[in-house]
Image (cartoon, rainbow, N blue to C red):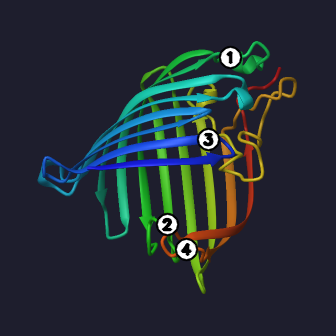
Amino acid sequence: GELSFGAGVSSQDGVLGDIGIVERNLLGRGQSLRLNTTISIRTQELDLSFTEPYFLGRNLLTGIDLFRKTSDQQDVSSFDKKSLGASLRIGYVVSENLRHTVRYTLRRDEINDVSLTASRFIKEQEGKTSTSAIGHNLSYDVRDSRIDPSSGYVVRFGQELAGFGGNVKHIKNTIDYSYHYPLGSGLVATAQLKNGHIYGIGQDVKINNRFLLGGHSLRGFEPGGVGPRDLLTKDALGGNFFYSATADMSFPIDLSKEFPISGSVFSDIGALTTVDESGV
C-alpha cells in the first residue's frame, strides 16, 4: 500500500490538504482500493474507490466509487452544498487508443444555509434533491504521456441522462479537446477547447447542476465570476451552456533535477450563457 500527503495554496479554495491511501494489488489479484480526503477552507471531500481490472476474467475494468462532499458557495452564490452518493462503472478498450466507460450514479444533494440576502432564485432551490443517472465517456488519447504530455492530443466526450428515479431530470453533454506540440528545448505549446450543455427534461436545471466558469476554469476571473447572475444580489446563478479555450506555452525551470519545476504563459477565453431563470 501507499500513503501520500499533500498541501498547497489555491486562489479558489485557499489553504488545502490532501491525504490518500492506495492499495494497488488487493489480495494479490490486481484489484485496487483507494481512499482520498481533501480538506480546504471551502471544500471537504471524501472518496472511496474500488476497482477490478478483469471482471469475470475478461478485459473489463469495473469499479464502485463512494463520495461525500461539502462545499462553501457563500462568496459565489450565498449557499452551502452537500453531496452524498455512489457510482458504478464499467470500462473497456475499443482499440489501442480508444476507451469507453459506462457509469451509473445515485446521488443526494442538499442546498442549505442560504443567506437571508441571497437571490430569490437561489432561495427557491433550498432543500434536498435526489439524482439517478446513467452516463458514458468516450476518450481517444494519442498523447506521449498522460501525466506530462509534450506531443499528441486527446478528445473526451461525455453524456449523462438523469431521470431513472429521483426527482432530477436532465441530459448533459460535454466535450474536451487538448493538443500538445513540442517546440524544442523543453518548450511545449498546448491548445485546449472545452464545451458543455445541459438541458432540463420537463423542469428547470437545478443550480447545483449548472456549469460555473471562473477560477481554475477561466483564469483571471473569480470562481463563478463569469455568466448569469442576479443583478440585485450579485449571486452567480450558473449557466446551461459554456465554452472555454486556452492557448498555453510551458517551459522548464532548471532549479533542481530532483524537483523539476515548469512555468507557463497562457491566454484564456470563454463564455457562460443561458439560464432557466427569467427574472420576471
User: What residue is shown at x 42% (from left), y 56% (from top)?
Assistant: 138
Give the secondary structure at mark 1: loop
Q: Amino acid at mark 4?
A: Ser
**Is the residue 40 above or below the residue 268 in the image?**
above
Determine whether, in the image, residue 253 is placed left or right of residue 214: left
Give the secondary structure at mark 4: loop
Can residue 205 be spotted in the picture?
no
Q: Earlier in the sequence, mark 3 or mark 1?
A: 3
User: What residue is shown at x 53% (from left), y 71% (from top)?
Assistant: 260
User: What residue is shown at x 59% (from left), y 77% (from top)?
Assistant: 254
Q: Nearer the viewer, residue 86 or 60?
A: 86
Q: Amino acid at mark 3?
A: Val
Q: Nearer the viewer, mark 1 or mark 2?
A: 1
Q: Nearer the viewer, residue 240 or 178?
A: 178
Distance Cα–Cα, label 1 vs label 2: 40 Å
Mark 1 — residue? 114
Quadrant holding the C terminus: top right
Q: Earlier in the sequence, mark 4 or mark 2?
A: 2
Give the secondary structure at mark 2: strand
Q: Which mark is residue 256?
A: 4
Distance Cα–Cα, label 3 vs label 4: 25 Å
Distance Cα–Cα, label 3 vs label 1: 24 Å
Distance Cα–Cα, label 2 vs label 3: 31 Å
Q: Earlier in the sequence, mark 1 or mark 2?
A: 1
Mark 2 — residue? 154
Q: Amino acid at mark 1?
A: Val
